[in-house]
Amino acid sequence: MAIHLKKNEQVEKMYRAGQIVREVLDRLGEMVAVGVTTEELDVEAERICTARGADCLFKGVPGRGKADPFPGNICASINEEVVHGIPSPRRVLEDGDIVSVDFGVQLNGWCADAARTYCVGTVPRDARNLVEATKHCLDLAVERMRPGEKWSSIARSMQDYARSRGFSVVEEFVGHGIGREMHEDPKVPNFVSAELRRRDIVLKPGLVIAVEPMVNLGAKGVRVLGDGWTIVTADGKCSAHWEHTLAVIDNGVRVLTG
C-alpha cells in the first residue's frame, strides 16, 4: 500500500471541500419527501457544488466492463439498493422508502466524500432501526479513531455492533483513503478479514480515510443490476449507508464532512 499522509494545510483544504459535501447533504435531507424524484436531488446537488466553485466527483467515473460512465452527480440508492443507484426522473420517492445518498466533490484539487440514509414519510420500524444502527457504526469509528489505534479493532466493533442488532455488514464494498484522488490507499473495511489481520492499518496523524459502513437488513450478499452500476441486496431486503471523510489528528479525529 502507498498511503500518503496529509499535512495540516492539506487537511484544511479537504475540510473546505468536506463542508460543501455537508451543505449538499443537509439540503438534500430537507428536500427528501414523498413525490420527489432522485433526479431533483441530483440537480440540486450539482447546483450547490457549482455555486461553491467545486466539481462533482461521481459524474463520468468509468464503468466496469461494458457499463457506461456514471451519469449522476449523486448516487441515490433506494431500499434494497445498497450503493451506486443512478438518479432518474422515473425514481419517485414513496412513503416508507429509505434512500441512501452518496456525494463527493473536488475543490482546488482536494476531495471529500460522504453519505447519509434518509427516511421518507412513515418508514417501517425494522428499516428505521437499520438506518440508526448503520449511523451508529459510523459513530463508533469516529469515537475510536486516534493515533496508534489499529483499524482492525475499530472494524471489529462496527461489525459486532451491526450483528448484535441482527443486521449484516456488506463485504464487497469498503471505505478508502482519499486526498487528491477520490480513491487512494488504504482500503478501509467495515469488518475483520484475514487480509486485514495480515495487513492491519495503524492510525497515524495525517491519515485521511472515507469510512462508509453499508449494512443490510438481511444477509450480506449483494449483486449488480443490468445497468452495470446499481448494487442491490441479494435477498431483496433493505440496506443503509453512512459515510464521513475523517482525518486522524494528534489528539483524535477530525470529521471533515461534518
Image: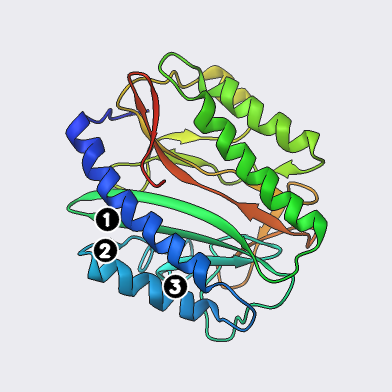
Q: Which residue is mark 1?
A: 106
Residue 135 in percent (x, y) is at 61, 45
Look at 61% across and 72% down and name the residue there. 226
Q: Quadrant of the N terminus?
A: top left
What number is the disc on residue 68? 3
Q: Given contact means CB atoms under 8 Å apart, are the residues at marks 2 and 1 in contact? A: yes
Mark 3 is on which residue type?
Answer: Asp
Determine the CA span between mark 1 and mark 3. 22 Å
Picture layout, residue 162 above or below residue 196: below
Labels 1 and 3 touching (C-beta < 8 A): no
Image coordinates of residue 200 in percent, x first then y, are: 50, 20
Q: Is residue 208 left or right of residue 52?
A: right
Give the amino acid type for the residue marked by disc 2 in the picture: Asp
Q: Is 235 placed above or below 258 here?
A: below
* Residue at disc 3, secondary structure: loop
Mark 1 or 3, nearer chain start? 3
Q: Is residue 13 above or below residue 24?
A: above
Q: Badge 2 is on which residue?
A: 55
